Each structure stands twice: as C-alpha cells, then as structure tokens.
Image (tube, helix red, strand yellow):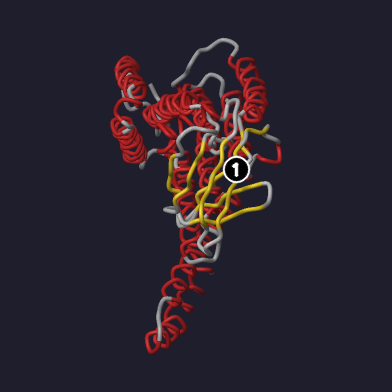
Amino acid sequence: MSGSEHRLRLPGSYHLARLAAVTVILAALGFIALSLAMPSTTLRAEMSADHRSVVLHTPQGTLELSPDTPVEIRLDDEQPFTLPAAQLDLPAARSAPDRIALARHLEDGTATARFTAADGTAHTLNIARQPTRLSDLPPGYWIGLGFTVLGALFGLTAWSLRPSEAAAACYAVIGLFLFTSELPFILFMLFGLATPAWVNVVNTLASAILLQGFALSFATLFAIFPRPIFKPAHLRIGLGIAGLIALVTALSYPLHGGQTHFTVLMLEYLALFGFLLWQFWIGRKQALYRRSLMILLVTVLVGIALYALATLLPMMGLLPVSVQQEVSFPIFVLIYGGIGLAVIRTRHLALDGWMRDIMLSVGFLTAVLLLDVLVLALVTQQQGAALGLSFTAAALVYFPLREWLAR
C-alpha cells in the first residue's frame, strides 16, 4: 500500500474537524475562565529567568531578594516557620509541608512575611487572597495560549483538506495533544502561595498524561508518513503496547518523581527521530515522497536555527533571558505548521519555483545571521591583542565568506 493510498475511512471527517475546531475555541475560553478562578495573593513571588534573584510583587511595588534570603512566615498566632525566598516560587517546593500549610491557611485567613533585604532594610508584608484579574495574566500566558490554539486549528484544517488520509488525521490528533498538553504548563504560571496542593498534583498528572500522548502521536505520524513503515496490524499492536506503557508511566508520575516518565518520553522522541530518518532513507530516490521530505527537512532546519538564535542572543546579553522561554513554544508551533504543509502537499506549497527560492533564501539568511551572532559572541569575549587579531580575522576571512553566503 503506497503512501498516497494509505487512507483512513472515517465518515463525516470534515464535519468532525469543524466540531473539534469549535470545541478547541470553547475550551480556550473555558481555560481563561478557569485561570481567573485561580487564587491569587497580595504577595506574589517570581523567580527571575536567570535564577539569580526572586522578585516579590506587592501592592506597594516590587522587591528583589537573593534566592537564599530567609523569609519568616507567621500564620496568625501559630508558631512561625522560615523558608528561603526561592521556595516561595520553586515548583518543587509546592508540595513541602510548610507551603501546604500556608495555602490551606490562606483559604480563609491571612499571613505575614518578614525578611531583611540586601540593603539591610527590614520588611513586614501581609499575605491575603485576592481575585485574579485579566491584567494579572502574564504575557507568556497569552503567547502560549494563542499559539497553541492556532496550532490545534491548523491541524484540524489540514485534516479537513485531506479527510481520507491517515496522516492528516494523525496530524490533527497531534494538534489536539499540542493544545491540551500546553494548558497545564500555562496554568503552572499562575500557581502561587494560595494554590492548594491537590491542584498542583492534578495539574502535574494531567501534564504527564498529555505529554505522553503528544509524543506517541508524533512518533506514529512518522511511522505512517510519507509512507507506511509497518503493516497496519503491526502498527496497531505496537501502538497499543506503547500507549499502555505511556499511560502507566504517566499515572505513576507522583510516585517516581518523574524520572520514569521522562525516560519513556525520551524513548518516544528517539523513536520519532528514528522513524523520520527511516522515512528519509526509503524515500530518498522516490519523487512521489521527495516533496514532502524536502518540506520536512527545511522546516526542521529553519526551526533549529531559530531556536538557536533564541538561545544564543539571551546568552550574549542582547535580549532578556525570559525571551528564550517565551519564544520557544511559538517556534515549536511553527515547526508543527511546517510539518502540516508536508502533510497537505498542495501545489501552491510545493518546493519548486518561487516557493523553493523563498524558503531557501530564508534558510540561508538565517544561517548568515547565526554566523553573525557566533562571530560577535567570540569577538566580544576577547581582550587585548586577541581582540585585535579577532577583528583582523573577521575582516579578512569572515566578511568575504559572509558575502559569498549571502549571494
């Protein structure tokens, strides 16, 4: 059975895709309502992106503390306890007994935080619950939610354009897992001092299950696209066994601290890349599959280049460190969209003519920009005579090479 004949005969696929799209939009609106129902507090702690300080947000403004600054917490007339400032925000500290006691106390009471800042000033701050407002939702929340909704809708659109193809249906399932697996991660951004311990456990468990489903569905896509690698019966058996292992692993997440979960997740991603390499090998000489494989190749390379830029620029101090966290998921959604173009395979998106030239130009310009960043990083780290030699080497070797690349 060839890739073009590999069909999934599901009646009403087009209408099912439309229904799923409406469900995604309604789910996103419901998620916003859930986010606004999350408990907030008058004192909010946020670890800086470089983990060198803890920023405390108060009604009077912000304060910056060292992560190891001791903070004394007093719950009314009870015996006070002390936490390092880092534990006011670190996810691992949410299940600590003191944090659980604080969250439980804030359900109908108030607390007091006392600490001494780096300049020697003593502070006493009140901690009380308050409603969450739309303005309290951080930019990363809206970026993540917006891109994950777009990704899910794009996947469903691809399925509606190819309703009888198994690859398109699998691609749509990946989009739904992309959407649902990102929601727990976004919700983690809103967790604070008043978040109940059970909410953290449920959200962590949901994240583990959905991430396993996402990785498994992605690996399945490259097992059947551009052409099936396994016989359908063998694929179903393997998928059933892998799905059962993934589910049991995810459900045991609270017991094993996530080590087994991440190990199985990495194995699924290794299988994904193995299937992708296999597809390139068996389709390298077949014109029928070469177009899809080329789109996949360019998409992955451009995505890796963009991610490298998002990682290098903050390391050089040219952009805030938080930028890497905020743009990583949008870049991944763009990679997902590029894979969708390979699944759709329309003539307008074929890698020939002007479309090929545009994609190659984008790829080469990204490569040139990456080289600029690397050279700038190396030069700015030199001093004295080494700095002069670096400038000379850049002028005599790099810039001529750069101009040749740009042409």
| 281 or 143: nearer the viewer | 143
Label 1 residue SS: loop
What's the amino acid at mark 1?
A: Leu
The answer to whether residue 4 is seen in the rendering is no
Q: Is residue 404 above or below residue 99?
A: below
User: Who's the residue at 56% across and 36% down the image?
Assistant: 111
Q: Quadrant of residue 156?
A: top right
Residue furthest out toward the front = 77
User: Who's the residue at 45% across and 75% down the image?
Assistant: 401
| Residue 163 x/y as whole percent | 56, 20
User: Who's the residue at 55% across and 54% down the image?
Assistant: 323
Q: Is residue 33 above or below residue 94?
A: above
Q: Quadrant of the N terminus?
A: top left
| 239 or 144: nearer the viewer | 144
User: Who's the residue at 47% across and 28% down the image?
Assistant: 200
Residue furthest out toward the top = 11
The answer to whether residue 63 is seen in the rendering is yes
| 192 or 271: nearer the viewer | 192
Q: How many marks?
A: 1
Question: Which residue was labeled with disc 1?
Answer: 43
| Residue 259 x/y as whole percent | 29, 34
| Residue 371 x/y as whole percent | 46, 67
